[in-house]
Amino acid sequence: MWNPAFAPLTHAAAGLDLPVDVGMAPANYGVHVEARRPDNTGYTLLRLGPYFQTWLASHDADRLNTELAGKAATAIPGFTVTAKAAPFDVSDHESYDDPYATDATVLLAAAIAREVSA
């Protein structure tokens, strides 16, 4: 028996674009790198996104935290820098860097360098 829920699968199997309305809102994810003071005030240092799968956002957040390991508290004096997966804010998409255009660790190093030299 045919079930309309199979429509996306048949399109993908035939190499066709998915229908515009598949009955679900698109899911987008991001990674926010935050610089926080001990009193929990701070700011977002870097935003990456959109990621179209949550595991990709989590993977990059883990990579960035590994890169920061041991120096998260000294990367920017007076702040602790950490990365976390977060929802992608479509209305603020201009403030995000494309994680597929440049390696996330390169973007992190550039953001920290900008902050330290400022």
Image (tube, grey):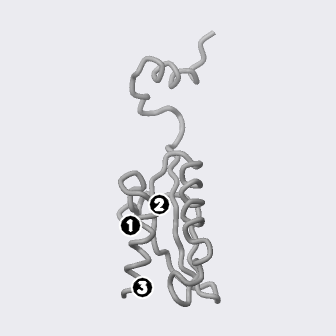
In this view, the residue farthest toward the front is 70
Q: Residue 25 appears at what percent x and percent y?
A: 51, 43
Q: Residues within 10 Å of mark 3 (few under 14, many from 20)?
A: few
Indicate which disc residue 46 carries: none
Element at badge 3? Answer: helix
Q: Is residue 112 above or below residue 102?
A: below
The amino acid type of the residue labelled 3 equals Val
21 relative position to 24: left or right: left
Look at 53% across and 57% down and name the residue there.
Answer: 60
Whichever of callouts 1 and 2 sits on the residue coming sooner in the sequence is 2
Q: Residues within 10 Å of mark 2 (few under 14, many from 20)?
A: some
The label nearer to you, 3 versus 2, is 3
Q: Quadrant of the N terminus?
A: top right
* C-beta proximity under 8 Å, tags 3 and 2: no
Look at 54% across and 64% down and name the residue there.
Answer: 64
Closer to the camera in the image, 116 or 16: 116
4 relative position to 104: left or right: right
Q: Is residue 1 above or below residue 77?
A: above
The amino acid type of the residue labelled 1 equals Ser
The label nearer to you, 1 versus 2, is 1
Q: Which residue is identified by label 3? A: 116
Q: Is residue 103 above or below residue 108?
A: above
Q: Quadrant of the C terminus?
A: bottom left
Q: Which residue is identified by label 2? A: 89
Q: Residues within 10 Å of mark 1 (few under 14, many from 20)?
A: few
Q: Residue 88 appears at what percent x and percent y?
A: 49, 58
Q: Which residue is identified by label 1? A: 95
